[in-house]
């Protein structure tokens, strides 16, 4: 199959050589029965790859199951995978089939294989070598024909060296390795993906997909994307929700991009920075963010928030406000290139977003106040809706947010309206 055709069929966006290479291997290995080990950071598309391989294999009409090895408690994983016999352990009131029995003939995707307990690894190796397994608490050896696709976002060889992963299993699984590259190694795909997610979003909400100006595209492609495609999708949706117009500038995007402490930056050219300098920078930015929120609440007449001594009045802060400790050594001046903001953490889900009457949007990072801010926001929305007898258009106008945003907030906070 042509690689472009394959992408179309499975909704794969991107055209970077590394992605194409990984897809080509996936296609070639699909029709064999070999085990496949897919490596790559979280959110790069490992699970998507596993489905492609299954769909292109002779097993495509047989079952496929994705098992997140890391999410199953150590005490139950053997039973989940291989089944158990009645009475095998407390609570085993019946015989139970495991995935290796129910998926017989099909494919099992074992995600986060590096988290698999050593005992389970031994059972898995046996299946891979002979197709044999035994239910927990049973003595009867059973046969199964299952293809294994495993995935990991950790360095399995390191686990092998640490004695946490069986070397023989590693080699057995690694017959055909596929590495799915992180987004920052295929920057040319970033805007393509952004457009796809913005278009999907617009279709869902019957609006126009957002564009980015050239500068904004550069800013986006320069972002580090620790959460890869999953994070990009999240960002594209946030941008779609938060912007009032169709084209977003770099300045607007900068505000929407997860405001991670720039301090977390470890760009190659900055590796020598004094850690203390990084901490000051981080503290300053946190203080700055906090103050922005305070100002918003203060100026919008939500002074109630400041009652009870929970929050102090916003103050003007200057970079100089955060002084090095007296004993700190002199800190070299470091300039932080604006465009190169590299962030370490993906945005947390349900990150509260404060909307002001101006066009400025402040992202709130997780810190103690965020919960009460979310609650206040919910309350505000409820009040506005009551005031306008549930008329969203008027309520949105009153709140100074778009109807689209109001709609999303209503859903997010589960407000009846
Ligand atoms: N090349 C791609 N084009 C479009 N969407 C993709 C692509 N790769 C992954 N995705 C989407 O990105 C998200 C994360 O993919 P997933 O396979 O779950 O990543 P992983 O298993 O590596 O954590 C999913 O929503 C998936 O549909
Ligand atoms: Mg995954």
Image: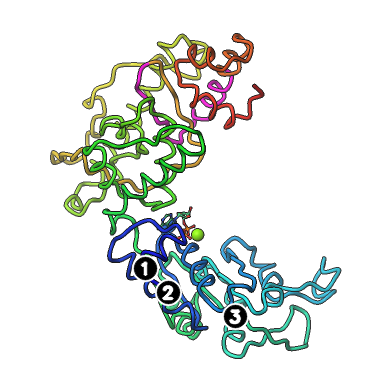
Question: Does the segment drawn in magenta span residue 377?
Answer: yes
Q: Which of marks 2 and 1 is in front?
A: 1
Left or right? Give the position of 84 relative to 401. right
Question: Marks 2 and 3, Cα distance to the nearest angstrom?
Answer: 25 Å
Residue 3 is labelled as 1
Q: Which residue is drawn at 35% across and 30% down?
A: 246
Q: Name the residue under label 3.
A: 124
User: Percent x, y for residue 10?
Assistant: 47, 61
Q: Earlier in the sequence, mark 1 or mark 3?
A: 1
Along the viewing direction, whichever of 69 and 149 lies nearer the viewer: 149
Q: In which quarter of the image is the N terminus?
A: bottom left
Residue 27 is labelled as 2
Q: Is residue 14 above or below residue 353?
A: below
Question: Marks 2 and 1, Cα distance to the nearest angstrom?
Answer: 9 Å
Left or right? Give the position of 197 relative to 220. right
Q: Look at the image and give the residue range highlighted in magenta.
A: 358-379
Most extreme residue toward the bottom is: 130
- Local secondary structure at mark 1: helix
Q: Which of marks 2 and 1 is nearer the N terminus?
A: 1
Q: Nearer the viewer, mark 2 or mark 3?
A: 2
Crowding at dot 3, Cα within 10 Å, few <14 / some 14-19 / many 20+, comes out as many
Question: Marks 1 and 3, Cα distance to the nearest angstrom?
Answer: 33 Å
Q: Which of marks 2 and 3 is nearer the N terminus?
A: 2
Along the viewing direction, whichever of 225 and 120 lies nearer the viewer: 225
Q: Which residue is drawn at 45% across and 29% down?
A: 353
């Amino acid at each position: 199959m042509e690689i472009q055709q394959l992408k179309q069929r499975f909704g794969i966006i991107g055209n970077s050589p590394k992605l194409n290479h990984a897809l080509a291997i996936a296609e070639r290995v699909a029709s064999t029965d070999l085990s496949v080990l897919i490596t790559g950071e979280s959110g790069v598309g490992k699970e998507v790859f596993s489905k492609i391989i299954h769909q292109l294999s002779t097993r495509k009409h047989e079952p496929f199951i994705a098992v997140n090895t890391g999410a199953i408690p150590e005490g139950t994983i053997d039973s989940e995978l291989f089944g158990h016999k009645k009475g095998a352990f407390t609570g085993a009131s019946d015989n139970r089939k495991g995935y290796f029995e129910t998926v017989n003939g099909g494919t099992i995707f074992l995600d986060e294989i590096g988290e698999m307990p050593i005992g389970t690894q031994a059972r898995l190796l046996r299946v891979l070598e002979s197709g044999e397994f035994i239910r927990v608490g049973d003595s009867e050896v059973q046969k199964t024909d299952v293809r294994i696709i495993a995935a990991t976002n950790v360095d399995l060889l390191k686990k092998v060296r640490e004695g946490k992963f069986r070397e023989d299993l590693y080699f057995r699984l690694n017959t055909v390795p596929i590495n799915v590259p992180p987004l920052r190694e295929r920057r040319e795909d970033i805007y393509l993906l952004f457009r796809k997610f913005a278009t999907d979003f617009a279709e869902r909400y019957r609006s126009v997909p957002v564009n980015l100006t050239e500068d904004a595209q550069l800013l986006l492609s320069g972002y580090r994307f620790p959460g890869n495609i999953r994070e990009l999708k999240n960002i594209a949706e946030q941008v779609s929700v938060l912007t009032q117009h169709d084209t977003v500038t770099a300045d607007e995007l900068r505000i929407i991009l997860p405001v991670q402490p720039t301090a977390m930056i470890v760009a190659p050219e900055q590796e020598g920075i004094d850690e203390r300098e990084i901490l000051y920078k981080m503290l300053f930015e946190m203080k700055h963010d906090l103050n922005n929120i305070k100002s918003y609440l203060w100026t919008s007449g939500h002074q109630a928030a400041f009652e009870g001594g929970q929050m102090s009045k916003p103050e003007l802060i200057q970079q100089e406000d955060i002084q090095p400790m007296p004993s700190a050594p002199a800190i070299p001046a470091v300039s932080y290139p604006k465009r190169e903001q590299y962030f370490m953490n993906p945005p947390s889900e349900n990150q509260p977003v404060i909307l002001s009457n101006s066009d400025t949007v402040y992202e709130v990072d997780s810190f103690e106040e965020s919960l009460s801010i979310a609650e206040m926001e919910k309350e505000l929305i409820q009040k506005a809706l009551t005031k306008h007898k549930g008329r969203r258009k008027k309520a949105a106008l009153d709140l100074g947010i778009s109807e689209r945003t109001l709609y999303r907030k209503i859903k997010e906070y589960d407000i009846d309206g």
